[in-house]
Amino acid sequence: MELAATENGPSKLNRSYDRSVIRLNSLSLDWYLSRRMDATVWRFSGEETTTTDEALRMFIRGIKSPEKVQKLEIICEKCPLITDVGLNAIGENLKRFAALKNLQIEFPDCANITNQGIKAINQGLKKLNSLISININFSACDRITNENLKEMNQSLKKLTLLQDLDLSFISCSLITDEGLKNISKNLKRFLSLKSISLDFSGCEITDEGLEGLNKNIKTLTSLKGIGADFSYCRAITDEGLKSLSQGIKSLSFLESIKIVFCGCMHLTDEGIKFLNESLKQFNTTLKSLNLDFYSCEELTDEGLKVVSEDLKLFGLLKHLNLDFSYRRKITNEALKALGENLKTLSALKSLSLKFKGCSGYTDSDLKTLSQDLATLTFVEDLTLEFGLIKGITNEVLKNIGQDLQKLTSLQSLALCFSG
């Protein structure tokens, strides 16, 4: 177990945590807590095999002056000894943190958490009217239900100051369209919301759930960043992506967009066209774009070309990630369109292109692409992933290397050629 307290106000979240943190056993926990009376930031990071309900209870109850705490992070991943008892202790004590502004509660893959534990957390959330940022992650906790999300929605709707909302329920198999609609219903209340991220990958979500989401995100006029991950929700079709695209199109000032539909087997180029049309209106604001359609096998060259040809519109774009791995074919025409439009992005600092498991292009096509990339002199981070290319020569690899050497700002480079 790692605990960290910062006495000089909120600090930027760091998943690695401070290496100087004391390793604590239960006996020393009270002593540690007593020495951190004035801390405004508290972190609890649980280890897989040693973190217990009692450790959580001691931590949350032992914090001195909780009314002064502004940031609270509790993260326990794959902790089999954590049960609803631990979550009850957290839920019961959250009301003591009246000044809390940032809350992060993550219990991914904690197999013994049930809907009763989530209910306790939901009850605690009702008392935190000062929250501006909340991150909740109960991924792979497969006893969470749609009813839990309905209760969470009721708790969240009172947080009228909320600016950042991040919810993850990856592979929660009991969550369906009803759950997504439950959590979406009161989004219109968050008039100050600037960023929203929803991860329901691996849940039982269909086009119906995305239609419900569409109806509610339209009202978020202050939104600057949106993230939506519905990977491996295999019933989603172009109609679902169209619904999400319509919701995005109704927004005004998006600077960051992340759309992930890995493994959605029924998506076609038509869905990509709907999405692309919704993106074009952000040509004067968009700074970060992440489109991930890994293993969407029905997509063809046409979808990639549609996205590529409009990249030139986004003159402010600094971060771009395109993943079209493991689909049918990418031809030289698609790569040519991609390269020609990428070289117009003079503000780009981070670029990731992933086309693993794809065929249809040659080593000379890659050479042409690398020549276009060589013009991106401000790029600091570059990732290129391609499938195995039959007959690729050392000479071509050498030429690609020479082109990439022209990227004088480059700090990080990752190249991959594999199936």
Image (cartoon, rainbow, N blue to C red):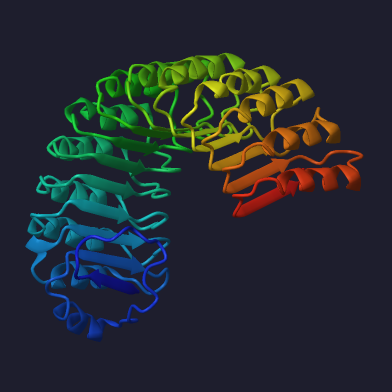
Identify the residue at image location x=61%, y=42%: 377
Identify the residue at image location x=20%, y=28%: 186
Q: Position of residue 46 (x, y in %)?
A: 35, 68
Question: Quick check: can you spot residue 266?
Answer: no
Identify the residue at image location x=8%, y=59%: 96
In this rendered view, identify the residue nearer to me: 57 or 366: 366
Question: Quick check: can you spot residue 416?
Answer: yes
Identify the residue at image location x=19%, y=44%: 132
Q: Position of residue 385 (x, y in %)?
A: 69, 43
Q: Give the image quarter of residue 77.
A: bottom left
Q: Position of residue 24 (x, y in %)?
A: 31, 81
**Horizontal placement of 166 versus 258: left or right?**
left
Question: Is residue 238 shown above or below 126?
Answer: above
Q: Position of residue 57 (x, y in %)?
A: 20, 69
**Horizontal placement of 402 versus 158: left or right?**
right
Question: Is residue 119 shown above or below 369?
Answer: below
Question: Is residue 72 shown above or below 151?
Answer: below
Q: Quadrant of the C terminus?
A: top right
